[in-house]
Amino acid sequence: MFDPILLRASDAEIVSDAPGSDITLLADSDTTDGGFTANRATLKDGVFGTPAHFHTRATEFFFVLEGKLQVLVEETLHTLEKGDFLAVPPRVPHAFGPAAGSDADVLVTFTPGMARFDYYRLLDRVARGEADPSEIAASSKQYDNHYVDSPIWRAARGQ
């Protein structure tokens, strides 16, 4: 059991994994007794988004607050709009980024909780040139973030 969590917007830590891609850290597993992890992803039009990946233990939830989000689930592309919700179970490859011509503001949660904040901080350090990108691949087991190749996602993102 964990204590109620109140995080004021002015107190939230915000990191960035690329220009135009901010991650607001809301609640990590250490504050929720492992129940959930939550962040807010704010993605500007044109941002690549995440590479295709999967998690072995957690279900990842997406709730679109504003804009449009393009999501790959296995080999299917979906466009989520404001108010849309998606749950991706463990071991299902997925990726997400803003839909073409749109920004996206998304609440992202994981259950059970996974220690993700240090992973996001690592992405921020890599984006600022303070850490080597190889550290991301080396951390896949620690943060339960396993990257996979997806020609469909690369083509959808113009790569």
Image (spheres, helix red, strand yellow):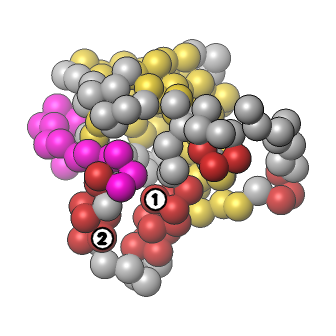
Seen at 87% across and 49% down, the residue is 8
Find residue 84 and report its horizontal and vertical position in percent.
Answer: 57, 16
Q: Residues within 10 Å of mark 2 (few under 14, many from 20)?
A: few
Seen at 31% across and 61% down, the residue is 139
As helix, strand or loop, the secondary structure at mark 1 comes to helix
Amino acid type assigned to the residue bearing label 1 in the image: Tyr
Q: Which residue is mark 2?
A: 135
Q: Is residue 17 left or right of residue 66?
A: left
Q: Is residue 27 left or right of residue 126?
A: right
Nearest the eye: 58 or 126: 58
Seen at 17% across and 32% down, the residue is 152
State yes or no: residue 16 in magenta. no
In the rendered image, the vertical position of residue 22 relative to residue 68, given as above or below: below
Find residue 97 and report its horizontal and vertical position in percent.
Answer: 42, 40
Nearest the eye: 140 or 42: 140
Work out which quarter of the rendered image holds the N terminus and state it. Answer: top right
User: Which of pointers 1 and 2 lies earlier in the amino acid sequence?
Assistant: 1
Seen at 46% across and 19% down, the residue is 87
From which residue to which does the magenta span run? 142-159
Q: Quadrant of residue 70?
A: top left
In the rendered image, the vertical position of residue 100 relative to residue 28, given as above or below: above
Q: Which residue is mark 1?
A: 119
Amino acid type assigned to the residue bearing label 2 in the image: Glu
Nearest the eye: 149 or 67: 149
As helix, strand or loop, the secondary structure at mark 2 comes to helix
State yes or no: residue 149 in magenta. yes
Q: Is residue 93 in sight in this rendering?
A: yes
Q: CA distance from mark 1 to mark 2?
A: 10 Å
- Mark 1–mark 2 CB contact (< 8 Å): no
Q: Residues within 10 Å of mark 1 (few under 14, many from 20)?
A: some
